[in-house]
Structure formats: C-alpha cells, structure tokens
Image (cartoon, rainbow, N blue to C red):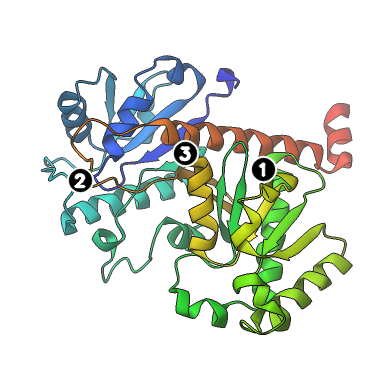
Amino acid sequence: MNKEENIKVGITIGDPNGVGGEIILKAFEDPRMLEMYTPVVFASTKLLSFYAKTFDLKTKIHGITSLDEVVPGKFNVLRLIKEPFIVNWGEVSTEAGKLAIRSLQAATAALKENKIDVLVTAPINKESIHSEDFKFPGHTDYLNQELEGESLMFMVSDELRVGLLTDHVPVKDVPSIINAKLIMTKIGTIKESLKKDFGISKPRIAVLGINPHVGDNGVIGTEDQDTLIPALEQLREDGNIIFGPYAADSFFGNKKYREFDAVLASYHDQGLIPFKTIAFGHGVNYTAGLSHVRTSPDHGTGFDIAGKGTANPESFVAAIHAAIEIHRKRKEYETLNENPLKKLSRKRR
C-alpha cells in the first residue's frame, strides 16, 4: 500500500455497548497501520478514551471537531457528541442505537462529500437502531439509499467470495422476491465488482439453487425451473460466464467454490453459513455496486463478550485493508478504461 496516497478511512463506532470500540482501538495499536492511511473515527474522544482505559490499550487519540482538522499519521476521532455516553456492555439500548445511527449518518455524509475516501463500519444491533426515523434493517439498505448504484451484500475473503440474491428478508418471502430482473441485476453487479474492484477481467460466477437439490425437476418446488434456470440461460447467451444452478448442500463441502471467482447464493443463510464456517474471523462484508467503498467485519456486535477485552480485531483489520485495496483497484480500473482521447489531450498540454 502506498502511504503517499494518504487515503482517509472513515470508521463508524457501531453499537457502543458492543465490541466495536475495542476492535477499532486494537486495530490501531500497531503504529504501522497509521503509516499506510489516515483513520477518522466518528464518535467522541471521551468514549474512545473510556475504551482505551478499560482495555488498557495504548492507541493515542487525536481529537478533532471538524474534518478539516484531520492529521495524517494520527488516530483521528471526530467529536459527534459533547456529553459522556454511559456504556452498558451487551445491552440493547435506544441511546446506543441513536449514537450508532448518528455515527453512520455523519460518516456517510463525509463519504458523499469526498472528505473521506472509504468507509469501514463497526457492527450495529438491528433492534437498537430501528426507529421511526431509521427504518432500515442494516447498513446495506441505508447506504443503498444514500449512495449511487445498486447495492449487493458481498462477503469476501482470500479464498471465497459470496454474493446474496436476497439478504435481510424472512425466508418465507424469498421465493416471491426472486425474479428474472433481480437475478440479472445481482449477477451484473457481481460481474462488474469482480472486474472493477478485484481486477478479474473475465469473472467466473457460480449460482446456487433456490430449493433443495435445485428443486429436483419441480418435485421440491418449481422456482428454479420457472425463474432461475431461464434467467441463467439468458445471461449465458449474452456472453456471461455463469455456471449452475448448483445444489447448495454439497457445493461448499466438496470445495466446488474454488473453481469460481464468486458464488451467488439465493438467500442470507444459504450463503453466510458456509462463508462464516470457512472464513470466519478474517472475512469481510463488502457492499458492492455503489459509488463509494464500504466494508465491515464479518461478525456482529459481540454482546456476549463485550467489555471482557477478548474481542479479536482480525476481521476489522481485514475490512480496513480490503477497503483500501478495493479503492486502489477502482482507481486502476478507471485509469485503464479512461477515454484515450482525454489521455492524449493531457499529454499534449
């Protein structure tokens, strides 16, 4: 990573009653992290100082009141609140939810204004954040509204990438949501992300069936035969390198996923259970398809271990590195695909 780029990494605090503050500080205990990019945490110096004291962490906190005060090489914390926040470890709390939302909204606004380059979000609690003012089930849906593009929940690690056809919806609603347009849109998003964000010129994408055994020719549901298979055939006719649908029960166990650049799962648990079994602790939740880069660790708020000092920052560090790498890949892609007439014009100046 090129430290001369001075990439600003915006970081949300997540649920303050969870492990977010702990893993953020642990991630930056190694001073070499600050040589590679500049973090900006959207919270308060009092709250981060409380976490540092609680867990005996030595990360030096640089408090700021404006993004114009960000200092490269420092662990910058933007003050969103003046009053102290009382942490109640592992508790679902409306006040905690309000701070988590405030942090997310402020960081997203900074991202849209290009005052930060990428966004890394600490975990939130869906019950805490849900209110009349914030009716989104999670980060992905909120960012899909705020940023340009069509979002895709894309779980990525060094050995596996899994996208979701449907994400935070009840299982009973999955078949009614899946249609040809959705399938083509999501596969298009995966394909573009693999090319633009991961540098893969000819992506190979596998698709998992909706029903057990891909419906067994209609014996266990007809959605695969009626909707999924025709859509995949159309995509192949259009020149996409698409395989499947595969029966999900054996796909991961026999390591079939290693033959592809990405896998599209039909619903949340079909994709995330195997992903977290294979890559938990070093996987990253990436919101693909949007105008800006956002990543998150592959775990939740960790209420069961909050306050104990045992939270592992590995996935959070991986999320930071992934955001930086995707940002860099996007810049390379834009340069390679820039209008050659514009390049020639600049050279002649």
User: Is the residue under label 2 in contact with that under label 1 (CB below 8 Å)?
Assistant: no
Residue under label 1: 197
Which of the labelled discs sits on residue 17, or is there none? Answer: 2
Residue at x 20% of width, y 45% of height: 17
In the foreground, 293 or 283: 283
Is residue 109 placed above or below 39 in the rendered structure?
below
Q: Amino acid at mark 3?
A: Lys
Residue at x 20% of width, y 52% of height: 96
In the foreground, 42 or 162: 162
Q: In the rendering, at what x and y percent does residue 271 appear?
A: 55, 58
Q: Amino acid at mark 2?
A: Asn
Q: In the rendering, at what x and y percent does residue 203 appear?
A: 77, 49
Residue at x 88% of width, y 68% of height: 237
User: Is the residue under label 3 in contact with that under label 1 (CB below 8 Å)?
Assistant: no
Badge 3 marks a residue whose secondary structure is loop
Q: Residue 70, located in which quarter of the rendered image?
A: top left
Q: In the rendering, at what x and y percent does residue 260 appear?
A: 73, 48
Give the mark, 2 or 3, whose residue is nearer the N terminus: 2
Q: Amino acid at mark 1?
A: Asp
Disc 3 crowd, CA 10 A, few/some/many (<14, 14-19, 20+): some
Which of the labelled discs sits on residue 115, or is there none? Answer: 3
In the foreground, 67 or 255: 255
Q: CA distance from mark 2 to mark 3?
A: 28 Å
Is residue 318 placed above or below 150 in the rendered structure?
above
